[in-house]
Image (cartoon, rainbow, N blue to C red):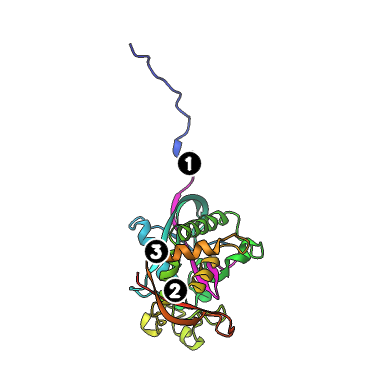
Amino acid sequence: MSTPFSRSIPPYPARDTAPKRLIVTASITTFAIRDWSLCVLLREGPWGPPMRLVLGTESVADAVERTLDALLLWPAHASLVQMKAGWQEQQVCVWGSTEEGAAVSLIHSVLLRANRDELRANLQQHSIPSLRVTWVPVAEIELGRRMIDPEAFPSLQTALHTLRSQIQRNPEIVLRFLADMHTMRTAESAGVIPQQETNVFLEQGTGPMIAFREPETGNGILTLAEATLLYRAFFPPDEQIDLSNLRRRFLATNTLQLINEDRPVRGREMDWRRVSRAYKYLG
């Protein structure tokens, strides 16, 4: 014999106790390497990575693609490393309105292909304020020199952890990155678009790809010294890394062919001592 189940009915509809609106967002944390250091693309001001509202007619993946299109002039054939970092809750304000609400955001971390971070519009004058962004060294954030909004900081930490874990598990990403790299761009020279070119596209937000010359790709030649420098760039300076074991892991990928040549380490050409044996990446 079953026992009847009863419960009291609240005197007001349940919808009145829920947030005014549940907003789904796609939060994009974009990383790039400059002068052998890791940089992250952040919105101007104290906030974290760029974020795009997911419209009812699109998927989260579509929103991620739209955000990248808004931030970067990105060639369709250029490869990147993209990883999902899971869902997180945060509070958002909808730009252009007074509406606020709780958001469930899918965090993506993206590592830009070598030297492709320069293919972008004048982001400091982007038509959407939340997409006005700049490159910031990760070390400045982790050392407390660059403050991030407390509500956005966990998203950046999650994306950074995802990127570092992926590099630790698969060091071939480092080799593939170097094989595509033509030169090591410094923080001063990388990503600079002449002012006369950006003025044309200020009203459009981003300009057509035809207006920009895509950076040259590498010839697949790299050195283990460069691979070590790049690997270390993803981690804090005080991170303990077994360099001899790291070199063995690079060679164990079976994607490197030794060639009879010594090469200067890119970005260290002025230092005559920075010469290392060259390899051809076969991946």
Whole-percent x, y for residue 110 in the image:
44, 64
Q: Residue at 39% x, 77% y: name it.
A: 220
Q: What residue type is labelled 1?
A: Ala
In terms of secondary structure, where does tag 1 sit? loop
Q: What stretch is highlighted in magenta?
A: 19-46
| The N terminus: image quadrant | top left
Q: Residue at 45% x, 57% y: name it.
A: 169
Q: Residues within 10 Å of mark 1 (few under 14, many from 20)?
A: few
Compare residues 60 and 270 and report the one nearer the observer.
Answer: 270
Q: Between tags 3 and 1, which lies in front?
A: 3
Q: Which amino acid does label 2 sit on?
A: Leu
The tag earlier along the polypeptide, 3 or 2, is 2
Q: Is residue 241 left or right of residue 143?
A: left
How many angstroms separate mark 3 from mark 2 (CA)? 15 Å
* Residue receiving disc 3: 253
In terms of secondary structure, where does tag 3 sit? loop
Q: Are marks 3 and 2 in contact (CB under 8 Å)?
A: no
* Residue receiving disc 1: 18
Whole-percent x, y for residue 2 in the image:
34, 14
* Residue receiving disc 2: 178
How many angstroms separate mark 3 from mark 1 (CA)? 52 Å
